[in-house]
Image (cartoon, rainbow, N blue to C red):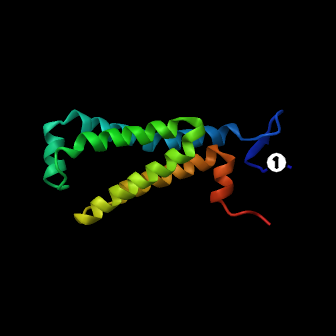
Amino acid sequence: MAPIASTEHRDGALRPKRSLLWTGRVLNALPLLALTMSATMKLSHAPDFVAMWTGKLGWPEGSLTSIGLLELAVVAVHLVPRASLVGAALITAYLGGAVSAHVRIGDAFVVPVVLGVLLWVGFALRDERVRALVLPRRS
């Protein structure tokens, strides 16, 4: 018997219900879009962003490009279906670094935490294997 959140297909594989699949995709898209936007700002080297990056955050200007490319790389890995679990882990690691950077300067760190939660909740909603890892099992 298939779990309530899934339907069994002809090939015997369990797939999430359509509503869960699309909810998961939307929740996954939010952090991916935020990371893409952040990478775009870093790669553009806009004067206001560079001032905040070097002044408030205390990072050297030379790190903008490499960190922006890293953001794009982890998003790209997550978008490859066979590598999405590795991509989610890499994004989580990146967001952990973002939390650390904000804590270091005494800044609010809610945004990277929320992005990480959205990423994993969305991933669990759209992937039965992740849901089995994250959610407690019924007896």
Instruction: Compare residues 15 and 110 and report the one nearer the observer.
Output: 15
Q: Nearer the viewer, residue 23 or 55?
A: 55
In the picture as drawn, the residue positioned furthest to the right comes out as 1
Q: Quadrant of residue 45?
A: top left
Residue 112 found in image quarter: bottom left
Locate residue 133, reporting x and y percent: 65, 57
Is residue 89 left or right of 48 when viewed as pictured? Answer: right
Query: Is label 1 in a helix, a strand or a loop?
Result: loop
Is residue 70 in sight in this rendering? yes
Residue name at image x 33 percent, y 55 percent: 98
How many circles with numbers are drawn on the protein? 1
Label 1 neighbour load within 10 Å: few <14, some 14-19, many 20+ = few
Find disc 1 in the rendering and name its residue.
2
x then y, percent, for residue 39: 31, 39
Residue at x 58%, y 36% (from the top left corner): 81
Q: Is residue 125 above or below residue 29?
A: below
Amino acid type assigned to the residue bearing label 1 in the image: Ala
Q: Is residue 53 left or right of residue 12?
A: left
Q: Residue at x 60, y 38 (%)?
A: 82
Find residue 102 and report its horizontal and vertical position in percent.
28, 60
Residue 103 located left or right of residue 4: left
User: How far across and how far down the image is residue 41, in percent?
Assistant: 26, 37
Residue placed at 48% from the left, 39% from the top? Answer: 77
**Residue 57 falls left or right of residue 84:** left
Quarter that holds the C terminus = bottom right
Mark yes or no: residue 108 visible: no
Residue 39 vs 60, above or below: the answer is: above
